[in-house]
Image: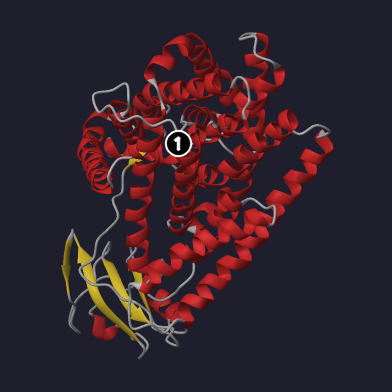
Amino acid sequence: MIPIEYVILIGSLLIILSIGVARLSENLGVPVLLLFLGIGMMAGSEGPGGIYFDDAALAQAIGVMALIFILFAGGLDTRWPEVKPTVWQATSLATLGVLLTAVLVGLFAFYVLKLSLISGLLLGAIVSSTDAAAVFSVLRSRSISLRGQLKPLLELESGSNDPMAVFLTVGILQLMTIPGTSLGSIAVLFAVQMGLGIVFGLGLGKLMVLMFNHMKSAYEGFYPVFAMAAASFIYGSTAACGGSGFLAVYIAGLIAGNSEFIHKKSMLRFFDGFAWLSQITMFLTLGLLVFPSRIIPVIGVGLACSFFLMLIARPVGVLISLLFARLQWREKVLVSWVGLRGAVPIVLATFPLLAGIPEAESIFHVVFFIVLTSALFQGWSIPAVARLLGLQAPFERKQRYPIEYAPVEGDDTRLEELVIPFDAAVAGRPLVELGLPRDALIVLVSRNGSFFVPGGGTVLEEGDIVQVLVSATGLPEVREILLSLKEEEPE
């Protein structure tokens, strides 16, 4: 048994190395997950590191725990007003799109690759979900974004399609391992899992926010610890009752992220970093689990499946799922192409290993190869495809401010950010003349990238970003004053 100090030393070195190498992805446009997986493989028993790791159960446990916090952090960071217009399209992609992708890949594996039908469908289910984080990391490295509703659509789809892939994988494994399992029972399982996932996510998410606002701890560090425990509890309780724990965790994060609670900004920063730690740990573990020599025999099968998935299965699934969506054909083409595979398929590929399926090891290495090729071929080409289709947009980095405001219990005051519009009525007027409510104060102005604290004589200009400390009751009046346009003079 390896002494614990060596485990800690090796683990910390791998994480530090991963963070250092991740800088390459910013210059090369390589999805960061590919680098993390590569480091894990290099550190494995067949790489220079020589670390022998062949424990699928431990890898699955680490993967599940990491996904809990990754999905919860994803929900926290999702702005509901932005994704709300895309709810039905994203839901269709996350359910019907995933199902169609799984079925098409399964049929391809059955007819072309000569796998059994049930094994082919299992392979299709495992690789059916997407990872938008990989997409956005590539776009961020090239300083571009996507136009219109494409970004929120992909963001919401990726956060909500993992539960469907998990359900399909577990359902097909039940058909393979439990005699007497019928398609009817699988349909009931789907309704129960998704239904309970939604109910538990909504209910426990609101309860978590309520408890946050009623905690009276002198130690700010207790709040992120409570949030971690709450996310784990939401997953565990939902899964123990037969629901989709991953869906519940994502919805709970979505509820919390779009609610006001104490120490919210510090909580968001904590989970942003913790989600990265979870991703690095998960990718490194999955990379260690892979034996490169076992991938070589499945390269042909892996390439065939990967190209079929990228060029036929995903596009067909997207086009049918978005048949009635008000999206241009170019937007649908881009949604089809940016369906990168991430860590979730590799985690799901450990399920057959633990279930003792005869073809489990081959399926695992085929899935790993599909993830690698998806990241390589699609990852590098996403910026070029977005430009070719005319759907690229300038990348807007999050504005950082020198001051922050954390609401306290029983106080509805908030720090609101407003942009003075073009031709605004307040443009060219000093603050003292605006007639702001008594419970409103402009505390900071951002102009041309610079910040300053305004006084009564400060004159606002078009395009100024102002931070206003205002109560909830006074906010509508402040919006009316600062965002109203000049009235046109009669001719």
The residue under the point 65% across, 56% down is 240
Left or right? Give the position of 115 relative to 404. right
**Residue 155 image offset from top left, x and y in percent:** 48, 45
Q: Nearer the viewer, residue 355 or 211?
A: 355
Among the 4 quarters of the image, the one containing residue 455:
bottom left
Q: Nearer the viewer, residue 108 or 405?
A: 108
Quadrant holding the N terminus? top left
Q: Nearer the viewer, residue 198 or 51?
A: 51
**Would you name the residue on which mark 1 appears?**
343
- Residue at the far bottom: name it: 438
Res 59 visible = yes
Q: Give the amino acid at mark 1.
A: Ala
Q: Residues within 10 Å of mark 1 (few under 14, many from 20)?
A: many
Res 485 visible = no
**Residue 351 image offset from top left, x and y in percent:** 58, 34
Quadrant holding the C terminus? bottom left
**Residue 244 image offset from top left, x and y in percent:** 63, 50
